[in-house]
Amino acid sequence: MPIIATNAGGGSFELCPTGNIQAVCAFVEDVGHEHSDLNNSWAHKVVILWELAEKMKDSRPFMLSKSYTVSLNEKANLRKDLASWRGKDFTEAELKGFDLEKLLNVNCLLNVVSYKKRDGSEGRKIASISPIIKGMNLLIPVNEKVPEWVEKRRDENEAAYSKSDAAPVVVLDETKATQTNSTPAGGPDLHSPPF
């Protein structure tokens, strides 16, 4: 029996609208070290996921994500997007260490644009991020679980990096590794941008 391969694409899914759309940061996920064939090196990556004010046909919010190298170098996309989002660059003190989890629950405006994927289909991506307009009602994330593709990406990166020559041997002191991601007393600070 023959096995037929086609270029049928990745399936059908709803595309969110384009333009400036209010969103809220729902997840900041460390996906480990990824290998770049372009410069044959490993880079520590994070994925930031936003829920949009725009809803799908089934009333769930659209979600968009962007992947970044974990770096606040002046040329790093993460630093550029965060400076745009907060409306100011980082201070020298902040550049010494900035907790990306401060982004959780923070509202913004995403400039969403259309682009053509490698397979020829249409996609959406984030062109820029800016603070919300004063007086806008704030969004609160509704998704409680990170999408499966993020977990899969993390697992694949971890497996590949652990087999590489670049992976350091790390011994964890489990008594110090009991950190929680709980929200501080009083609930999350949803004002934009508190970071």
Image (tube, grey):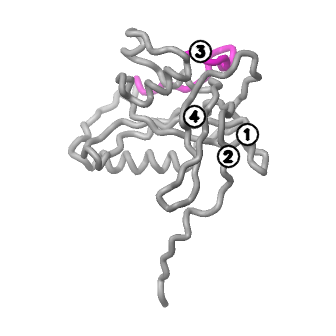
Marked residue nearer the N-terminal end (3 or 1): 1
Q: Which amino acid does label 3 sit on?
A: Pro
Marked residue nearer the N-terminal end (3 or 2): 2
Does residue 7 belong to the magenta stretch? no
User: In the rendered image, which residue does mark 1 sit on?
Assistant: 54
User: In the rendered image, which residue does mark 4 sit on?
Assistant: 27
Q: What residue type is labelled 2?
A: Cys
Q: Residue visible at 29% across and 49% down?
A: 37
Distance CA(mark 3)–CA(mark 2): 27 Å
Q: Residue visible at 37% across and 45% down?
A: 158
Distance CA(mark 4)–CA(mark 1): 18 Å
Marking on residue 16: 2
Disc 3 versus disc 2: nearer the observer: 2
Instruction: Give the quadrant of the C terminus.
Output: top right
Distance CA(mark 3)–CA(mark 1): 23 Å
Q: Which amino acid does label 4 sit on?
A: Phe
